[in-house]
Amino acid sequence: MPEAVHLASGKVRDIYALDEERLLLVASDRISTFDVVLGTPIPDKGRVLTGLSAYWFARTRQIVPNHLLELPADGRTMVCRKLRMLPIECVVRGYLAGSGWRDYGETGAVCGHRLPSGLQESGRLPESLFTPATKATEGHDENIDEERAAELVGADLYRRAKDAALELYRFASAHAEARGIILADTKFELGLAPDGELVLGDEALTPDSSRFWPADEYEPGRPQPSFDKQFVRDWCETTGWDKTAPGPELPDDVVADTRARYVEAFERLTAIPFERYVGDPGVVL
């Protein structure tokens, strides 16, 4: 779109302004691991992220409205409403994994939520937890407790964001479970429209923003196989790379396995053949 003005580029997405009210979000095939963008792209990764986000946006608007206005024919671009994004990541956890598992091991709590003793890695939590995080411009986001998050956004807006995120997680978790996938945790980006309406933005419920596990391989007490860049992380760990830029070039088999995992997540969650989406992105709406 020639009228688009480039605003910013993240690890995966490039953001353009179309006018005062609309943004163009383009999901590239870039992949990052250990906070370094690697030089080898994963073919179709951007289309998977865009297609899955659009699929979820179409099915969760009754819970909270979203920023999607149009899904162009390339399958990796979204025309979106411009929002004033909240300064927190809205993370919901249904299982004890990742930084939540590490925090629990050190303190017996996750983001201020005191948990029973004796829980296992990857174990299902007694109830889903809203565990906000700060947004890091570089490196990892930082987990914070609810009191700190409420200070950052205001008590009323914090409550609204928390309620929306928990309801989105409940809906998506049940949907994924019916398709043989466990949604262990996920993060949402919420923002405000000019009229103060709370709106879901960025991407939603993709392998880059969520921890999806195959239910038939689930076994608590250990890390789980997942529908994301696990193949890339595992291979990078074997190379002796010091995890600073530039990262190593990925071999063809790692690229192919990673692409297959992303596409499998798309097809299992949507029940739509990926090639059908590539030919007609509107099928997810």
Image (cartoon, helix red, strand yellow):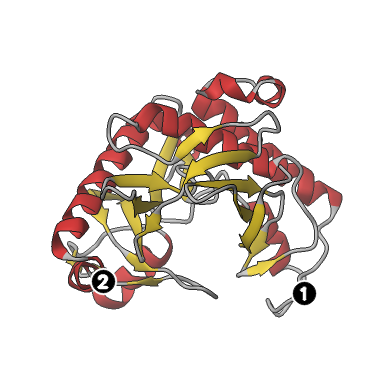
C-alpha span from label 2 to label 1: 34 Å
Query: From the viewer's perspective, is the residue at label 2 or at label 1 nearer?
Result: 2
| Residue lying at 69% horizontally and 49% vertically, measured from the top left | 28
Q: Is 190 situated above or below 61?
A: below
| Residue lying at 83% horizontally and 63% vertically, measured from the top left | 249
Quickly name the residue at label 1. 246
N-term mark: 2 or 1:
2
Label 1 residue SS: loop
Q: Return the residue nearer the eye: 278 or 68.
A: 68
Q: Amino acid at mark 1?
A: Pro
Taking the image as shown, residue 122 lies to the left or right of residue 270, namely: left
Residue 168 in view here: yes
Q: Position of residue 135 (x, y in %)?
A: 42, 69
Q: Amino acid at mark 2?
A: Leu
Quickly name the residue at label 2. 152
Viewport quadrant of the N terminus: top right
Residue 30: quarter of image: bottom right
Q: Return the residue nearer the eye: 214 or 6.
A: 6
